[in-house]
Amino acid sequence: MPVESANNRSLGFSVITNVQIIEGRARPPKGRPAIRDSLGIRLGLILVAILFLAVFVLVPLIVVFTEALKKGLGVYFASLTEPAALSAIELTLFVAAIAVPANLFFGVAAAWAIAKFDFPGKSLLITLIDLPFAVSPVIAGLIYILIFGAQGLGPFLQEHDIKIVFAVPGIVLATIFVTFPFVARELIPLMQAQGSEEEQAALSLGASGWQTFWRVTLPNVRWGLLYGVLLCNARAMGEFGAVSVVSGHIRGLTNTIPLHVEILYNEYKFSAAFAVASLLALLSLVTLLIKSIATWNVSASAQLREPSTGK
Amino acid sequence: MKIEAKDLVRTFGDYLALDKVSLKTEDGELVALLGPSGSGKTTLLRIIAGLDFPDSGNVVFDDQDSTGLKIQKRRVGFVFQNYALFRHMTVYKNIAFGLEVAPGSRRLSRAQIRDRVFELLGLIQLPSLEGRFPAQLSGGQRQRVALARALAIEPRILLLDEPFGTLDAMVRKELRLWVKELQRRLKITTLFVTHDQDEALEIADRIVVMNNGRVEQIGTPAAVCDEPASPFVWEFLRGHAIY
């Protein structure tokens, strides 16, 4: 059309307007990024996620607390303060007090070695750290029975009057085994991402290796470390499978909180069982709360780490 | 202090990073290590700093062999390409770090450290930013803080790895003249790594042109421009001139 092409030449904008009118239906949606889906899809996905969480997480959590308090606060506190419950709580705290520091030390050492040095067998070490996640806790318990029980070192240990399985040391060992990946797994990616330049800078300024670790390396990973310790602690206190195998279920001696809950439940003492279980539920809620504060801090400092643009 | 490198060789697996590199600087000189990436200039700088060790060859500071000396004992000020500021510390703490980790007998008092940090903040012209964290600084400010941190320990030599590499063009020009002036004032022997010909030609007293792990030529900016010692030097500096 000669008229239109003449128009185009004189008025550059008319072309654009024409195209828009012609392709009116294909006009891009305004005011939102291309990756954002339409309202229907978004609502649907959010709804599915909420429903799923409600059915599988929220409802059970509420059930634990309602069942625990069903027969009143009196029964609730009585179930928590009876001697067997108290000794289970005590043992659980004792085991965690050994397992968590042990794995804190191991986790920091392993993460440090893996993130900052190259050595043969490094990938094997990383795989081994993940092993407890891959192995069923029951197997973990059985391993210790095999090693320290009647088939293994049992007779020798008995001769020297050392008790490991069906006693507290066995429970501690099984718990350490099951919880050792938590701290290391949390720290390794963090330390790898940070590299070692800040450490090199510290050394060049005269700091010793020890000073560099305490003043530079550790403060840089403190939130990740806290998160790892919390997860490790939650698992150490809540572990059932591995501990169940090595414990021997001796009431007042080798029962931890999860084992005590099971015994109460099997004896049809539901209110008592749920009362003790509510302790573990409470622990997990506190863990999550501290965790979300820690995560918030990590992402805040990660944002700060981004190099600012411009001068 | 005078720095001397004698026949330094460094390999990474099969890769020859430094192939018998030798150089000698005078006291108070500003020397550029210039070359394309992979020419070995950063490796050379790291070996002089004590962050890396050569397979063979020697590093000599003021006629004293220092090849095996630990980095903590070398008293070198090293500024990293990405500055490597301690991100969890304020500017004040960053600059004070080297003074605070000094062993008891040599450590300054709190008040002395404070005076020294504020003196350095004045020197880098950032007098009121001591409470900021590195992430709250611009690139140019970070670079100057890194420099102040390195200078705090009163280093015998200053080593800068691509000091202007990550800055935008305007800031880069401004900062390199500022660094040059500062270096003149402090009279501290300084080596800096760069791949930017103009940068080397503009501020260096002498230039070490490197390629493939070897030194191609050492000379003043005028010398390497006017009398290139090899086809590589001629090609590498072609089109660049002294200001």
Image (cartoon, coloured by chain):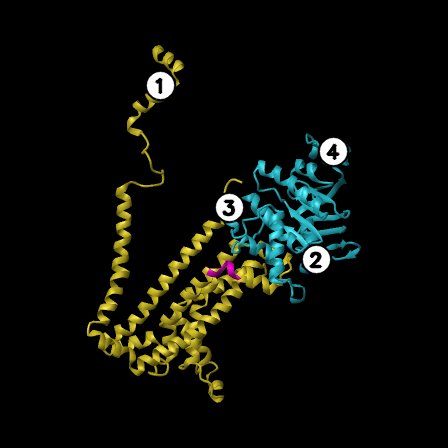
Chain colours: A yellow, B cyan
Q: Which residue in the structure is indicated by mark 2?
A: B74
Q: Which residue in the structure is indicated by mark 3?
A: A307
Residue A192's x, y, as percent?
52, 56
- Same chain for mark 4 and mark 1? The answer is no
Q: Is residue A219 magenta?
A: yes
Q: Which residue in the structure is indicated by mark 4?
A: B225
- Residue bounds of the magenta highlight: A218-222
State whether the magenta stretch is mostly helix, strand or loop. Answer: helix
Q: Amino acid at mark 1?
A: Ser
Q: Is residue A8 visible?
A: yes
**Distance in Å between CA atoms under marks 4 and 2:** 34 Å
- Same chain for mark 4 and mark 3? The answer is no
- Same chain for mark 1 and mark 3? The answer is yes
**Distance in Å between CA atoms under marks 1 and 2:** 72 Å
Q: Which residue in the structure is indicated by mark 1?
A: A14
Q: Nearer the viewer, residue A57 or B177?
A: B177
